[in-house]
Image (spheres, grey):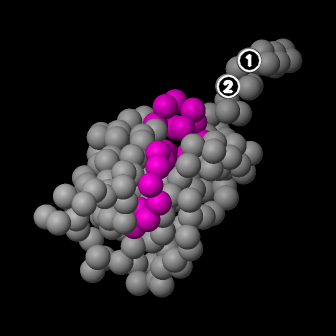
Amino acid sequence: MRAAKVKPLATIAAALWLTLSVVDAIAHGDESHKPKDAQVVKEQKDWGIAGSAKAVRRTFKVTMTNMRFTPDRLDVRHGETVRIILSNEGTVLHEFVLGTKKDLDEHAALMAKFPHMQHDEPYMAHVPPGKTGEIVWTFNRAGKFAFACLINGHYQAGMVGSVSVVAATVSSVMR
């Protein structure tokens, strides 16, 4: 009987990477981590605070496809509460996470180190393929912020967008 040949290291590494990627996607899960009727914790963040559905004045529809958000830029007024409806038309789980560039960079690095970490905040939505999700958020701080998919590899592939929050002018308040 002939001894089996040892596979090249590159083949073994590729198989290991593929296995971990599949396990990572399964472990993250296809469902939202929080039941729909759960109480939302309102914690002030640099980019705003969880909003009330009753206060929504405008709705944005954002499509998630493989490594892209459309639109990838949102313009809102300071103090405005918006509903962001997310539609995943891609083939894999995506998420939408609001934050500062610094916060998103830090969170993406943690997701790379700990891909199975569970989290569910009011500024995040996990959306399985073919499904929709939503975020209601009050942008009570003016500035430039961002949103991204922080699932391992998606942020690094450029699945990001921006939010510009501008101070309301006297004329826009009078309307």
Labelled pair 2, 1 in contact (Cβ < 8 Å): yes
Bounds of the magenta span? 138-159
Q: In which quarter of the image is the C terminus?
A: bottom left
Q: Which residue is drawn at 32% across and 64% down?
A: 80
Q: Is residue 111 visible?
A: no
**Inter-mark Cα distance, 2 to 1:** 6 Å
Q: Quadrant of residue 118?
A: bottom right
Tell me: residue 38, above or below residue 124. Answer: below
Q: Quadrant of residue 13?
A: top right
Report the residue marked by disc 1: 10
Q: Which residue is drawn at 36% across and 51% down?
A: 166
Disc 2 residue type (three-letter): Ala
- Counting from the top left corner in percent of width and height, residue 142 is at 44, 55
- Counting from the top left corner in percent of width and height, residue 144 is at 47, 45
Q: Can residue 43 be seen in this view?
A: yes
How packed is label 1: few (under 14 Cα within 10 Å), some, or many (20 or more)? few
How packed is label 2: few (under 14 Cα within 10 Å), some, or many (20 or more)? few
Taken as a whole, is the magenta stretch helix, strand or loop?
loop
